[in-house]
Image (tube, grey):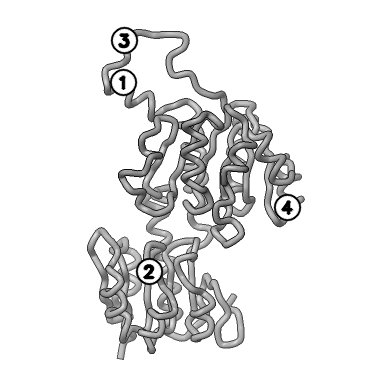
């Protein structure tokens, strides 16, 4: 009998071409995630689950899936999954690291440039018919070339953003709980404590995972330490930033602007006050959204799923199951 799997959203065809020949497959094809009650029902008799970061995979759901062997998350982050609960139940968890690094770094830098030069605001200005003539003081922004970039988090994506900053001859400071001397030497960047990075950055880019320690790391106290001309960029997780504090900071001029690809919650409610501000760019979590990258992510998730239902080590594991970590 073929293993049974449930996929919580439409996948690119190359990933389905891997899964369909080997598994009895049901896939949720609506644009929105399956409602909780539907997801609880669909996992009752599955061997594998391929999900997205919008799906909450917790202990009650796992307990409703007695045959479940593997949870394959089509994302790098996995804060939507209770990994400890999965490990206790012998369920392997996989993710898709590495593949979206360069694409996400491209987008982080695109947001930085767009916010610095007020690109979105200028486009709206043009469409509204406000462009009457050329003027010295129209839509003045911030220079990127030669500015100081502060990175909070120096994992794969933070490092890739630092590489891009070299082309703009930026001075790069970073803070990370784990110092990386080899990257400092390779890229000519400087480690500093968080307070120093925040105070000196012209652009502060967030690249830290969401944990209890980093939740609302960017709060009112941190925002008050930033330069009034500084710009905040977040392509990590929405809850790393206290959005209430950010709104106050942007409205009252503590900082010059912000560009967010992630919010808390997602999608951002249409009545959120951040959406009323011209100096805040908000995009719908699309940093990894290139055709090539999203296809690679889905294929990696498919390989994790198939390995899990076969009882084999996952190519990209998150947890330790059955006493050993898969390579």
Please say if the residues under marks 2 and 3 sit with CB atoms less than 8 Å apart. Answer: no
Dot 4 or dot 2: first in sequence order is 2
Residue at the spot of label 2: 51
Dot 3 or dot 1: first in sequence order is 1
Give the side of residue 9 with respect to residue 118, left or right.
left
Residue at image position (31%, 10%) is 132
> Residue 201 falls in which quadrant of the image?
top right
Q: Secondary structure at mark 2?
A: strand
Asked whether 286 or 221 is in front, the reply is 221
Q: CA distance from mark 3 to mark 1?
A: 9 Å
Dot 2 or dot 3: first in sequence order is 2
* Outermost residue, left side: 30
Residue at image position (36%, 35%) is 276
Residue at the spot of label 3: 132
Residue at the spot of label 4: 180
Within 10 Å of disc 2 (Cα), the crowding (few <14, some 14-19, many 20+) is many
Q: CA distance from mark 4 to mark 2?
A: 33 Å
Dot 3 or dot 4: first in sequence order is 3
Q: CA distance from mark 4 to mark 1?
A: 45 Å
């Amino acid at each position: 009998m073929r293993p049974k799997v449930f996929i919580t959203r439409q996948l690119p065809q190359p990933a389905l071409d891997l899964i369909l020949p080997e598994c009895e497959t049901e896939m949720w094809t609506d644009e929105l995630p399956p409602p909780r009650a539907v997801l609880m029902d669909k996992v009752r008799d599955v061997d594998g689950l391929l999900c997205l970061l919008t799906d909450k995979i917790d202990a009650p759901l796992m307990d409703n899936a007695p045959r479940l062997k593997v949870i394959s998350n089509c994302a790098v982050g996995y804060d939507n999954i209770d990994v400890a609960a999965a490990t206790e139940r012998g369920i392997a968890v996989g993710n898709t690291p590495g593949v979206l690094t360069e694409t996400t770094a491209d987008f982080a830098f695109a947001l930085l440039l767009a916010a610095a030069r007020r690109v979105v605001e200028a486009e709206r200005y043009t469409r509204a018919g406000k462009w009457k003539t050329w003027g010295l003081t129209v839509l003045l922004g911030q220079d990127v070339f030669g500015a100081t970039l502060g990175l909070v988090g120096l994992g794969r994506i933070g490092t890739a953003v630092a590489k891009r900053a070299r082309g703009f001859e930026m001075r790069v400071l970073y803070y990370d709980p784990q110092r990386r001397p080899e990257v400092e030497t390779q890229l000519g960047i400087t480690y500093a404590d968080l307070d120093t990075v925040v105070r000196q950055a012209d652009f502060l880019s967030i690249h830290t995972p969401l944990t209890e320690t980093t939740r609302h790391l960017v709060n009112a106290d941190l925002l008050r330490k930033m330069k009034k001309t500084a710009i905040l960029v977040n392509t990590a997780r929405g809850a790393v930033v206290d959005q209430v504090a950010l709104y106050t900071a942007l409205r009252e001029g503590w900082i010059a602007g912000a560009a967010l690809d992630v919010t808390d919650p997602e999608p951002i409610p249409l009545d959120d006050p951040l959406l009323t501000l011209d100096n805040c760019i908000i995009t719908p979590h699309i940093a990894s959204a290139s055709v090539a990258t999203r296809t690679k992510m889905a294929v990696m998730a498919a390989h994790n799923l198939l390995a899990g239902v076969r009882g084999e080590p996952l190519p990209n594991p998150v947890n330790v199951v059955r006493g050993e970590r898969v390579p």
